Image (cartoon, rainbow, N blue to C red):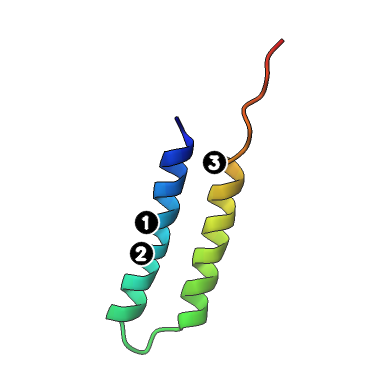
C-alpha cells in the first residue's frame, strides 16, 4: 500500500513547484525545476523499490 503514497508525494512536489513558480516574480525557474526533478528521482528510487522477498 505504499505506492499510492509515493505517487501522491510526487504530485505534491510538482504542484508545489508550479505554485511557487506562478506566485513568485523574479525567481530562478530552472533552479526550482531542477530541484523538483532531483526530488522526484530521489522519492521514486526510494518509494518504488520492489519489496525484498524473505525466504
Q: How many marks?
A: 3
Q: Quadrant of residue 19?
A: bottom left
Task: Identify the mark nearer the N-term, 3 or 2.
Answer: 2
At 48% from the left and 38% from the top, the residue drawn is 3
Q: Which residue is mark 2?
A: 15
**Residue 29 has which mark?**
none
Compared with residue 34, is residue 54 higher up or lower down, i.e. above or below? above
**Residue 47 has which mark?**
3
Distance from Cα at disc 3 to Cα at disc 1: 15 Å
Label 1: how many Cα within 10 Å (few below 14, some 14–19, many 20+): few
Distance from Cα at disc 2 to Cα at disc 1: 5 Å
Q: In the visual, does 41 lie left or right of 12?
A: right
Compared with residue 40, is residue 22 higher up or lower down, i.e. above or below? below
Q: In the visual, does 13 lie left or right of 33?
A: left
Label 3: how many Cα within 10 Å (few below 14, some 14–19, many 20+): some
**Residue 50 position in % (x across, y down):** 63, 33
**Which one is nearer the viewer's eye here, 42 or 7?**
7
At 58% from the left and 52% from the top, the residue drawn is 42
At 37% from the left and 89% from the top, the residue drawn is 26
> Are the residues tagged 2 and 1 within 8 Å (C-beta)?
yes
Spot the residue most to the bottom: 26
Quadrant the N terminus occupies: top left
At 41% from the left and 49% from the top, the residue drawn is 9
Task: Identify the mark nearer the N-term, 3 or 1.
Answer: 1
- Give the structural element (helix, strand or loop) at label 2: helix
Quadrant the C terminus occupies: top right
- Give the structural element (helix, strand or loop) at label 3: helix
**Residue 29 position in % (x across, y down):** 46, 81
Distance from Cα at disc 3 to Cα at disc 2: 19 Å
Compared with residue 35, is residue 30 higher up or lower down, i.e. above or below? below
**Which one is nearer the viewer's eye here, 42 or 51?**
51
Q: Which residue is mark 1?
A: 12
Amino acid at each position: 500500500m505504499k505506492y499510492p503514497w509515493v505517487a501522491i508525494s510526487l504530485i505534491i512536489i510538482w504542484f508545489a513547484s508550479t505554485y511557487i513558480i506562478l506566485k513568485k516574480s523574479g525567481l530562478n525557474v530552472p533552479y526550482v525545476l531542477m530541484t523538483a526533478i532531483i526530488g522526484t528521482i530521489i522519492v521514486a528510487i526510494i518509494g518504488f523499490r520492489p519489496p525484498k522477498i524473505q525466504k
